[in-house]
Amino acid sequence: MTAQIKIAQVNKVFKTPGDDVVALWDINLEIPNGQFVCLLGPSGCGKSTLLNAVAGFSHPTSGSITVDGALIKDTGPDRGMVFQEYALFPWMTVEQNIAFGLTIQKMPQEQIDSKVAELLETLKLVEFRKRFPKDLSGGMRQRVAIARILALNSPIMLMDEPFGALDALTRRSLQDELLKIWQEHKKTILFVTHSIEESIYLADRIIVLTYRPGTVKRDVLVDIPRPRDPSSAEFNALKRELGALVMEEQQRHQQAELCGSSSD
């Protein structure tokens, strides 16, 4: 399959008053159109740094990231971002938040109203359409954030631990909603998580990153039929395999912190 997102020899170094911090090193990935990919690893492995570079919020120190062959130089309508913190406009109602991008694009009001009504129905937000973000639960706020990205019809969805702050039941409900949306709309999704179970439940493919500097430790295809049962033998076999890989990196992280403390 032809790569929609191509990450080639990407390095990212942050300049600090002391030593420079190498966040990413020699990342090479090709993600085809319509694939659901999870970036998995412990804190400090560069998951969000890589996602932000694909979004265009930051740039690699060296290497390149392209979408459909075009070099990413900035943010763009072809890539929609969903954050853990929801990033909604607090002074706008649910329907106004969803409509915001379409209004900026100067879409005719009739089309905006139709699109917003469709997404309110899809994300089960109809009865909340006139509410403000402060009056919504975390799960409902995240539904609004996802609806706002879907309104723009971006072919690529970038998601930075979007369900990380939610309770287990709400999280599973939104995971199922996301899978339904992905299957219906054929989006390409790059999804950051530190949850092994979440990555197996959602992804076609899981990229395990090493602790700093972040490199690709393992590229795993998830060959488990959907819908996936977290209690199944094959699900748990993969969970153990990925758990061992992530634990190796977590231990490296802890060892690095201990060495850093002892040198103070």
Image: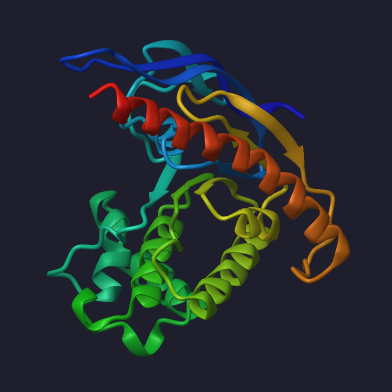
Question: In the rendered image, which quarter is residue 56 located in?
Answer: top left
Position above or below: 258 against 142 = above
Question: In the rendered image, which quarter is residue 138 located in?
Answer: bottom left
Task: Give the side of residue 243 with respect to residue 23, left or right.
Answer: right
**Depth check, front residue: 240 or 36:** 240
Q: How is the image coloured?
A: rainbow
User: Measured from the top left, where is residue 244 in percent x and y?
Assistant: 69, 43
Position above or below: 236 against 252 = below
Q: Residue at point 56% right, 55% down?
A: 195
**Depth check, front residue: 159 or 72:** 159
Q: Residue at point 32% right, 66% down?
A: 98
**From this viewpoint, which residue is outermost toward the front?**
262
**From this viewpoint, which residue is outermost toward the bottom?**
127
Question: In the rendered image, which quarter is residue 101 located in?
Answer: bottom left
**Depth check, front residue: 230 or 126:** 230
Whether residue 66 is visible to the viewer of this picture, yes or no, is yes
Q: Residue at point 65% right, 59% down?
A: 197
User: Measured from the top left, where is residue 27 in percent x and y?
Assistant: 55, 20
Position above or below: 132 against 96 = below
Position above or below: 60 against 93 = above
Q: Residue at point 56% right, 76% down?
A: 173
User: Measured from the top left, where is residue 119 in percent x and y?
Assistant: 45, 72
Task: Give the side of residue 68 with respect to residue 87, left or right.
Answer: right
Task: Give the side of residue 57 with respect to residue 67, left or right.
Answer: left
Q: Say which quadrant the N terminus sits in.
A: top right
Total marks placed: 0
Q: Say which quadrant the C terminus sits in.
A: top left
**From this viewpoint, which residue is outermost toward the top?**
62
Whether residue 45 is visible to the viewer of this picture, yes or no, is no
User: Measured from the top left, where is residue 31 in percent x and y?
Assistant: 65, 32
**From this viewpoint, which residue is outermost toward the left?**
91
